[in-house]
Image: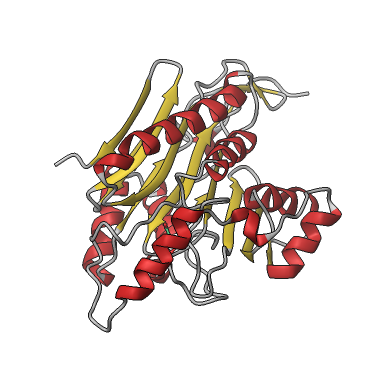
């Protein structure tokens, strides 16, 4: 039994008694649903999708649930929404299959769970969460990941169950027009609809999750940034929680989520760091994409260099969402 003490790790004065805050911390949830030139006729679906996800995550946080549960629930909503490149409705790889990647990470303990190249899971983030909670390992791929999930009660589905006609057509179009010319990385056809969430709970813990179907027409077995620790997703109570979206190869070369979290730890505001990270992505490797970033004090950043990125934010005082870049 100890008296009240100051938890300096959270960089803020919070009175803690026996591990429980005397003053509950105001929770925060931020989600994104991909960064690209989202066409006008898809704006509403993207905004609805991220708002629904924020509502699901907020339900967890507002009842005193954990940031980890909140990001999982928010991401599940977007995996279930065919608007996004996650779960059913994801982009198809070169062979016309859906191959999914996801990561979830807990800032208090640095526990993480990731799956890569899974073809028979509707909600890869659920499998990632099981890995985080129930495995000594951090990362499973392909059949091994599916077997792990199935053994823990997550039902497997057929790959066809994840494929929708819109994506069959999109792949057909892409392959019909694929040329050796360098693609325009900011073109509307190059969509990045990966989903992600970061959260802060009433105990002062943060978490992050990211889930994706990867890039259109990718080679089978290709893994992007989204499910790699520190690249597409990261969470550490001593730094920040981040989720990225965009062209994965450049993002992973810069280990961008960790890059940003470390800068927050050095004292920079998440708002600036998110913008700085996206500038760095473009300047260093000509990358494009977006990031959501949240520190354990509830300060956040949302940035993208693509024409649009769908995002939504929920706190006790604020509920907002957006899709266009602030110039
Ligand atoms: N980053 C993802 C990937 O490269 C794609 C995306 O964000 O939409 O797999």
The C terminus lies in quadrant: top left
Q: Is residue 91 left or right of residue 326?
A: right
Q: Quadrant of ligand 1?
A: bottom left
Above/below status of 116 relative to 69: below
Foreground: 116 or 98?
98
Residue at (68, 55) in percent of width and height: 121
Give residue 263's position: percent from left, percent from top.
36, 52
Q: Is residue 18 left or right of residue 235?
A: right
Above/below status of 239 relative to 217: above
Give residue 324's position: percent from left, percent from top.
23, 39
Give residue 18's position: percent from left, percent from top.
72, 24
Give residue 35's position: percent from left, percent from top.
33, 50
Foreground: 110 or 283?
283
Foreground: 263 or 213?
213
Residue at (57, 63) in percent of width and height: 98
Counting labels gives 0
Task: Report whether residue 265 is seen.
Answer: yes
Q: Quadrant of residue 19?
A: top right
Q: Is residue 308 left or right of residue 221?
A: left
Q: Is residue 113 left or right of residue 267?
A: right
Task: Report whether residue 269 is seen.
Answer: no
């Amino acid at each position: 039994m100890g008296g009240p003490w100051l938890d300096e790790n959270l960089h803020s004065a919070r009175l803690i008694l026996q591990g429980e805050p005397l003053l509950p911390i105001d929770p925060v949830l931020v989600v994104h649903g991909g960064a690209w030139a989202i066409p006008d006729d898809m704006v509403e679906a993207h905004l609805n999708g991220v708002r629904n996800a924020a509502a699901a995550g907020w339900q967890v946080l507002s009842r005193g649930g954990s940031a980890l549960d909140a990001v999982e629930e928010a991401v599940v909503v977007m995996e279930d929404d065919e608007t996004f490149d996650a779960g059913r409705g994801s982009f198809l790889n070169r062979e016309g299959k859906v191959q999914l990647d996801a990561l979830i990470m807990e800032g208090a303990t640095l526990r993480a769970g990731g799956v890569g190249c899974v073809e028979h899971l509707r909600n890869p983030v659920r499998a990632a969460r099981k890995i985080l909670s129930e495995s000594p390992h951090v990362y499973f791929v392909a059949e091994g990941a599916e077997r792990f999930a199935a053994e823990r009660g997550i039902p497997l589905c057929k790959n066809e169950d994840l494929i929708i006609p819109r994506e069959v057509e999109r792949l057909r179009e892409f392959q019909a027009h694929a040329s050796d010319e360098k693609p325009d990385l900011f073109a509307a056809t190059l969509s990045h609809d990966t989903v992600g969430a970061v959260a802060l709970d009433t105990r002062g813990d943060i978490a992050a999750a990211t889930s994706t179907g990867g890039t259109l027409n990718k080679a089978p077995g290709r893994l992007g940034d989204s499910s790699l620790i520190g690249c597409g997703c990261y969470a550490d109570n001593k730094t920040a929680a981040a989720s990225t979206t965009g062209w994965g190869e450049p993002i992973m070369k810069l280990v961008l989520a960790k890059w940003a979290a470390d800068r927050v730890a050095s004292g920079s505001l998440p708002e600036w760091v998110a913008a700085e990270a996206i500038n760095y992505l473009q300047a260093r490797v000509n990358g494009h994409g977006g990031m959501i970033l949240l520190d354990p004090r509830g300060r956040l950043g949302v940035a993208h260099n693509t024409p649009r990125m769908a995002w939504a934010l929920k706190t006790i005082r604020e509920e907002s969402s957006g899709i266009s870049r602030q110039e």
